[in-house]
Image (spheres, rainbow, N blue to C red):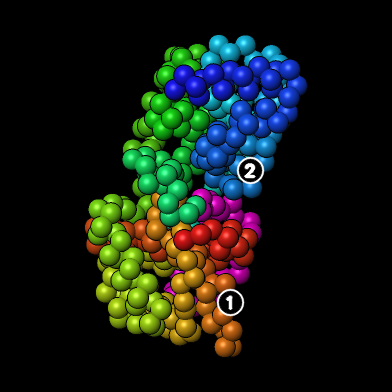
Amino acid sequence: MTGKTDDTAELLERARSGDQPAFADLVAPHRRELQRHCYRILGSLDDAEDATQDALLAAWRGIEGFAGRSSVRTWLYTIATRTSLRLAERRPGRVLSWDAHPARDPLGDLGAPDDGVAWLDPWISSVDDPAETAARREAISLAYLAALQQLPPSQRAALILRDVLDFSAAETAEMLETSVAAVNSALQRARASRADAGGAPDLTAPAAQEQRAVDAFVAAFEAGDVAGVVALLADDVRFTMPPLPAWFDGIADVSAFFAERSMITPWRVRSRVAVNGMPALVADQQVDGVWRPGAVMALGIHGSRIAWIASFLDPELLARAASLRS
């Protein structure tokens, strides 16, 4: 531990003197978690990347004046939080499919991609990403982030800093440039709003049970076994596929979509990834005899049943997921 502290102190001293490679080494261990933090506040991958870049640029410009009264990590989180909040104030809250449109007939018109909706982006990572297997998996879940997006940005940030990242009320107040009393008030309102939030499926399952459900889904899906897929679904299952406005509610409609539309062509699973802590599949679809990128399908599992299939169709997201190793 002492060696690590000494290394940080040396890098900090060199960075303060204008050594840019030293600064890069100083912030490198924090970069991914800072991006995840910005994403929690903003709900957008592109905005989170922009906010992270802007925050690190601001940190480089201000490194000479960093007095070291807090840790480097806390200092970087302060900059990233303020940067994200400035951006969040200019952005609409991100939403899930059922926040944006009513459920549709699975055999009817699915609609054109709705680019007018600020969809909540998925956080895609490799299956062995430690952040996705940690005890706080819920703190990156789509349902949790969708609930956060309904809060004012300041409440959103207070909840994340206190309940997810365990910063103290005093540290949070300094980061948000407010008082401890204001932080506690914002946190109380945010927690109350979260408790009242509904609409998202309950996704809880032991790891072994979850793995069995995923394996069974992959086997049935690749085999074109509609009955096998349907047997894995919860009665209240939902199927979403942004940016299309259509989504389906309940086992009857989801089953009809699989039987009459989705699985009338062959599918294969190219790799497995994680989407906001959920197991997910990068799947190709065979069209006119050619395998093409089809969807990133995140499986939300409650008990032994699949309660939510979050299928993402955006080509950029497909490419991002395909670039990760399973």
The amino acid type, in three-letter code, at marker 1 is Arg
User: On the picture, is 79 further left or further right than 165?
Assistant: right
Q: Which residue is mark 1?
A: 292
Labels in figure, total:
2
Q: Report the front residue among 265 and 7.
A: 7
Residue at left 50%, top 30%? 157
Magenta span: 99-124
Q: Residue 271's spot in the image, x, y percent?
A: 47, 66
* Direction bottom: furthest residue: 289
Tell whether label 1 touches label 2 (CB within 8 Å): no
Q: Report the front residue among 291 and 23.
A: 23
Residue 103 colored magenta? yes
Residue at left 43%, top 43%? 131
- How crowded pointer 2 is (Cα within 10 Å; few <14, some 14-19, many 20+) is rated as some
Q: Report the front residue among 213 and 30.
A: 30
At mark 2, the secondary structure is: helix
Q: Which residue is mark 2?
A: 49
The amino acid type, in three-letter code, at marker 2 is Glu
* Direction front: furthest residue: 3
Q: Residue 298's spot in the image, x, y percent?
A: 43, 61
In this picture, is 132 found above or below 67?
below
Residue at left 58%, top 18%? 9
Residue 99 showing in the rendered view: no
